[in-house]
């Protein structure tokens, strides 16, 4: 579905009504379905970490259960239902996820949610189940969800989120309406950081650019100084890797694959993916501005040192490693394969 023409205001009015940064087309698509009485029993929001999938899912749940008299004013953000959903304690809205990013969503969690959804709404119009990062679900957990997807009660709405449709079973995909969330324009992220989180203009401009269109990352970087420090460390590590030999890269893969690093590891690979994309932009003389503008000298160096084929291979390898980690493939093996596909390998 094509995006509508951008509004002149960098913070879209329709999206702002739902408390969303960007994704105006998705908000309008969902709102249009509600206006015409077409509420699907299952939705799947797809996109990279930090892009706003869970925020949109919660806003949609609020839209479904908001108590405001004017349907066009929902979600109002002020009624009891909206406040409870925002606080995570509405009796008819449940969020289920693995215990940690990169963990496993278990069958027991899905069964407990299905038991809750079988009950009629306690306060709202709908029972809403949000299954976050469903690509982390075990096959048995996905199977447990199928019965509800096939025979949903009329008052139940399921919202799944995932980073990639390729990570989910076809039986799940075929029963969901899929909305692919794309990176949010830099100006919209920048405007939201200034207007809603009080960032100064210089800070907002920097974080919006470095976010790569992921508002969640930008907000986290604004409130947590460690986020920027971790980003710098990740990019410094990438530069060192490209000077290492095979033995060094094997050792690095082993260190990165430690269980305690799993959440940070996924973010590191996302940052590396954005970096390789930037190198391709420089190599191809694209008019699109690189995300990592503060590393322009390094981007130019790699554009000189490596061929387009080498950089595309590195980008593809990083993407595949992210997918493998989501499938709970052996992390060390996935990282070894990725690092051996990176250019600059010393003999």
Image (tube, rainbow, N blue to C red):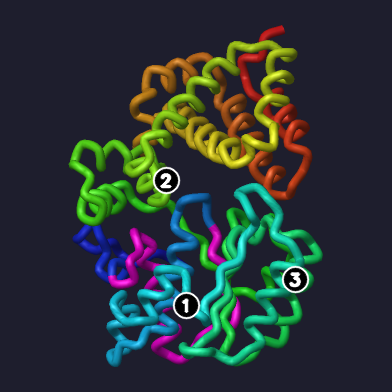
Label 2 neighbourhood size at 10 Å, few (<14), some (14-19), many (20+)? many
Residue 106's place in the image compared with 309, above or below, is below
- Give the residue at mark 2: 217
- Give the residue at mark 3: 171
Q: Indicate which label's residue lies in the foreground, 1 or 3.
A: 1
Give the CA separation, mark 2 to mark 1. 26 Å
The magenta region covers 17-46
Label 1 neighbourhood size at 10 Å, few (<14), some (14-19), many (20+)? many
Mark found first going from the N terminus, 2 or 3: 3
Q: Are marks 2 and 1 in contact (CB under 8 Å)?
A: no
| Residue 327 covered by magenta stretch | no
- Give the residue at mark 1: 90
Give the CA separation, mark 1 to mark 3. 30 Å
Secondary structure under the numbered disc 2 in the rendered image = helix
Residue 315's place in the image compared with 222, above or below, is above
- Residue 294 position in % (x across, y down): 34, 26
Is residue 25 among what the camera can see? yes
Q: Quadrant of the C terminus?
A: top right
In the depicted view, which residue is nearer to us: 228 or 305?
228
Mark found first going from the N terminus, 2 or 1: 1
Mark found first going from the N terminus, 1 or 3: 1
Left or right? Give the position of 11 relative to 240: left
Left or right? Give the position of 64 relative to 12: right
Give the CA separation, mark 2 to mark 3. 31 Å
Picture quadrant where residue 250 is located: top right
């Amino acid at each position: 579905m094509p995006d509508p023409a951008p509004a002149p205001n960098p913070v879209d009015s329709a999206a702002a009504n739902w408390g969303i940064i960007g994704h105006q087309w998705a908000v309008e698509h969902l709102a249009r379905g509600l206006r015409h009485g077409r509420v699907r029993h299952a939705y799947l929001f797809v996109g990279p970490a930090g892009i706003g999938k869970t925020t949109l899912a919660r806003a949609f749940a609020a839209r479904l259960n908001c108590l405001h008299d004017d349907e066009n004013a929902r979600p109002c953000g002020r009624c009891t239902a909206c406040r409870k959903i925002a606080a995570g304690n509405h009796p008819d809205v449940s969020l289920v996820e693995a215990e940690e990013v990169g963990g496993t969503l278990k069958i027991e969690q899905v069964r407990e949610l299905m038991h809750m959804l079988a009950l009629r709404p306690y306060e709202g119009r709908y029972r809403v189940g949000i299954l976050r990062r469903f690509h982390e679900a075990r096959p048995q957990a996905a199977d447990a969800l199928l019965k509800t997807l096939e025979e949903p009660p009329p008052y139940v709405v399921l919202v799944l989120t995932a980073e990639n449709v390729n990570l989910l079973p076809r039986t799940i995909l075929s029963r969901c309406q899929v909305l692919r969330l794309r990176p949010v324009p830099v100006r919209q992220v920048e405007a939201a950081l200034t207007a809603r989180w009080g960032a100064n203009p210089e800070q907002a401009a920097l974080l919006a650019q470095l976010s790569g269109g992921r508002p969640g990352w930008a907000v986290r970087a604004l409130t947590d100084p460690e986020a920027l420090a971790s980003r710098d460390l990740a990019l410094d590590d990438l530069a060192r890797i490209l000077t290492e030999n095979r033995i060094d890269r094997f050792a690095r893969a082993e260190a990165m694959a430690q269980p305690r690093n799993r959440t940070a590891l996924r973010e590191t690979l996302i940052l590396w993916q954005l970096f390789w994309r930037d190198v391709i932009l420089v190599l191809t003389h694209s008019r699109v501005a690189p995300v990592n503008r503060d590393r322009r000298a390094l981007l130019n160096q790699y554009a000189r040192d490596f061929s387009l084929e080498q950089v595309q291979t590195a980008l593809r390898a990083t993407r595949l490693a992210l997918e493998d980690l989501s499938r709970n493939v052996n992390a060390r093996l996935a990282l070894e394969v990725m690092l051996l596909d990176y250019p600059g390998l010393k003999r």
